[in-house]
């Protein structure tokens, strides 16, 4: 992985902490809107992590595959990810 591992790790640990907090909120029967807001905040973190990882993949792995004349597999992977993101 070519993404900034320190930043990715920090963000993922933050998301994990938020998930633990959301589980506690559910167990405590907290207000639904408060839970939903926390879920959206966690999703935003995960979205940003995924974006960073995919950007690094494009800038390194895909770029080098194109330069080597062997980009078909990498491009298929990116198209599959774009398809999943679009669902």
Image: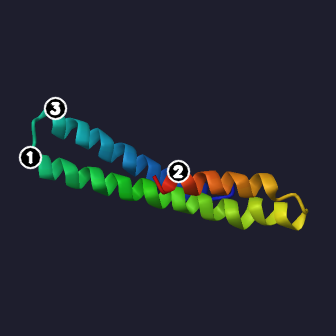
Mark number displayed over residue 27: 3
Q: Which residue is mark 2?
A: 84
Q: Earlier in the sequence, mark 2 or mark 3?
A: 3
Q: Which residue is mark 1?
A: 31
The quarter holding residue 63 reads bottom right
The quarter holding residue 28 reads top left
Q: Residue at x 59, y 53 (%)?
A: 81
Farthest residue toward the top?
27
Question: In the rendered image of this protein, does residue 27 appear above or below residue 62?
Answer: above
Q: Nearer the viewer, residue 81 or 21?
A: 81
Contact, mark 1 vs mark 2 (Cβ under 8 Å): no
Label 1, residues with CA under 10 Å away: few <14, some 14-19, many ≥20 = few
Q: Position of residue 44 (x, y in %)?
A: 37, 59
Q: Position of residue 71 (x, y in %)?
A: 82, 59
Per the model, the C-alpha gap separating discs 2 and 3 is 31 Å
Q: Nearer the viewer, residue 35 or 7?
A: 35
Farthest residue toward the right?
68
């Amino acid at each position: 992985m070519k993404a900034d591992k320190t930043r990715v790790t920090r963000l993922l640990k933050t998301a994990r902490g938020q998930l633990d907090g959301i589980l506690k909120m559910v167990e405590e029967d907290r207000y639904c809107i408060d839970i939903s807001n926390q879920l959206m905040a966690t999703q935003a973190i995960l979205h940003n992590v995924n974006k960073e990882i995919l950007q690094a993949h494009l800038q390194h792995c895909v770029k080098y595959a194109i330069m080597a004349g062997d980009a078909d597999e990498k491009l298929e992977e990116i198209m599959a990810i774009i398809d999943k993101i679009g669902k």
